[in-house]
Amino acid sequence: MWIERLAREIGALGQEGSSTPERAVDRLSTVAARGVPGCSAALVVVWRAVERGDGDDVAEHPGGHVVVDYGASHSDLAAAFEHQYATDQGPAVEAVREMRPVSVGDVLRGDRWPRYTSMAVQCGDRSSVTLPRAFGDEVLTLGVHSGRADAFDPVIVQPLIELLAEQATAMLLQAGRYSDAEREAAHMRRAMSSRGVIDQAKGIIMHARGCDADEAFRELRRVAQRNRMKVAEVARKLVEEHAAGTTTGPRRVAVR
């Protein structure tokens, strides 16, 4: 049954603790497209508010928001969203601008978004339900779309989208923390690697000059300042040249 399948999919999303934000929005759009009745494609967009003074013209962005990332279950819907963003018309940009759910029974009825209608039809976006949800400093919009008019029963669909949006924001917050931890780990790995190279370079200088470790480091720093390089870069060049048998000290290391 579809509701059991959707429950399993939502449960699986909650267990993806090592997902990145980019993978998270893609997974969320796929789960929504597969699990929501009547849905043929889904769109997940993460927005960030633009403040005056950020270097952006706020008037150029929907509701004062720019796109941080987005995931679409189908390429046609991705193209339709890019058109929404470019023209500032459509369900996702209206949802983030007004911070309320946006339902479309048939995009061909009326003249709601004249610059979006033609593209929507071409991309199979006749009807949709889009829900915005704030999390942290950002806003998520989750939209389910169909190529058929009046494809969604609001009584059934809106609670499902709210549940998915709640899970989505939790997943994105978790993914953001994971990405921060990964960046910190990468920084630590680089720092440890640099320290190892600097220690090797100091050893080379100490052996060649008969000096102590402090004097060897001061020499590395002098060369780095003279050549406008980082100490780790000077050390790495020295170690590489020493291994190749082309130098006996850091004075050979220079930016040509």
Image: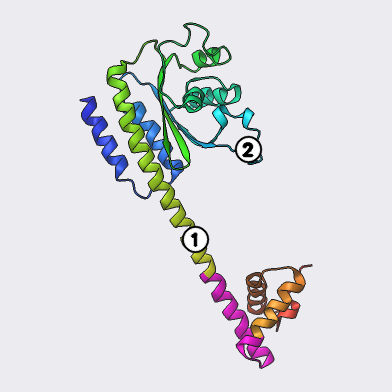
Q: Nearer the viewer, mark 1 or mark 2?
A: 2
Q: Which residue is mark 1?
A: 186
Q: Determine whether the residue tagged by mark 2 lies in a helix, strand or loop.
A: loop
Give the amino acid type for the residue marked by disc 1 in the picture. Answer: Ala
Q: Who is closer to the viewer here, 87 or 95?
A: 95
Is 207 within the magenta?
yes
Quarter of the picture containing the N terminus is top left
Give the amino acid type for the residue marked by disc 2 in the picture. Answer: Arg
| Residue 52: image tag | 2
Pinpoint residue 51: horizontal percent, then vertical percent. 59, 38
In magenta, the rendered stretch is 192-215
Is 168 within the magenta?
no
| Residue 105: image tag | none
Tell me which residue sits at (44%, 13%) in the image: 126
Q: Who is closer to the viewer here, 28 or 137?
A: 137
Q: How many marks?
A: 2
Tell me which residue sits at (74%, 68%) in the image: 228
The image quadrant that residue 128 belongs to is top left
The image quadrant that residue 36 belongs to is top left
- The main secondary structure of the magenta stretch is helix
The image quadrant that residue 152 belongs to is top left
Tell me which residue sits at (58%, 37%) in the image: 50
Pinpoint residue 27: horizontal percent, then vertical percent. 38, 37
Q: Determine whether the residue tagged by mark 1 lies in a helix, strand or loop.
A: helix
Question: Where 67 sits versus 239, above or below?
Answer: above
